[in-house]
Image (tube, rainbow, N blue to C red):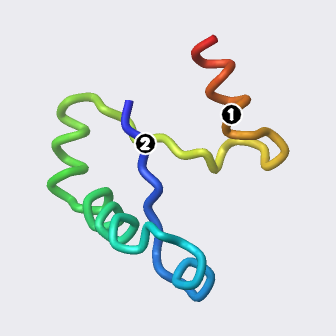
Amino acid sequence: MLIFHSGYLDDYILNYSSLLIPRTKEVVFLTDKQIKQQLNEKHIDLKSFKHKSKASSTFQYWKKLFL
């Protein structure tokens, strides 16, 4: 399992995040057509936490998966 925290830079991130360069590189990587094709050929799906309720925490989500 790989976890990415990709994102575009906005005022909040520029002022409060230490992950400026990694976030932008992850966006480039995850939106690259060749990468998407290779992932598809290997039957690897990209998932998002967007489908999770804002009320549920990331910790609780992973706890249910692995414990």
Q: Is residue 14 above or below residue 40?
A: below
**Whole-percent x and y of residue 55?**
84, 45
Query: Which residue corresponds to mark 1?
Result: 59
Which class describes the residues within 10 Å of circle 2: few (<14), some (14-19), or many (20+)?
few
Which residue appears at 31% of the width and 32% of the height? 44
Q: Is residue 3 above or below residue 13?
A: above
Which residue appears at 34% of the width and 64% of the height? 22
**Whole-percent x and y of residue 28?**
28, 67
Circle 1 SS class? helix
Task: Give me the C-alpha separation between circle 2 and circle 1.
Answer: 14 Å
Extreme-bottom residue of the structure: 11
Query: Which residue corresponds to mark 2?
Result: 3
**Whole-percent x and y of residue 42?**
20, 30
Task: Give me the disc on residue 18.
Answer: none
Q: Quick one: quadrant of the N terminus?
A: top left
Asked if the residue under mark 1 is in contact with the one under mark 2, i.e. CB atoms within 8 Å, the reply is no
Along the horizontal axis of the image, is 14 left or right of 37?
right
Extreme-top residue of the structure: 67
Which residue appears at 64% of the width and 50% of the height? 50
Along the horizontal axis of the image, is 16 left or right of 44?
right
Circle 2 SS class? loop
Q: Quick one: quadrant of the C terminus?
A: top right
Which residue appears at 70% of the width and 41% of the height? 52
Q: Pick whichever, 32 or 55, lies toward us.
A: 55
Amino acid under label 2? Answer: Ile
Please tell me which of labels 2 and 1 falls first in the chain.
2
Amino acid under label 1? Answer: Phe
Which class describes the residues within 10 Å of circle 1: few (<14), some (14-19), or many (20+)?
few
Where, by quadrant of the figure, is residue 64 drawn? top right
Q: How many numbered marks does the figure carry?
A: 2
Q: Is residue 17 above or below residue 33?
A: below
**Whole-percent x and y of residue 30?**
31, 57
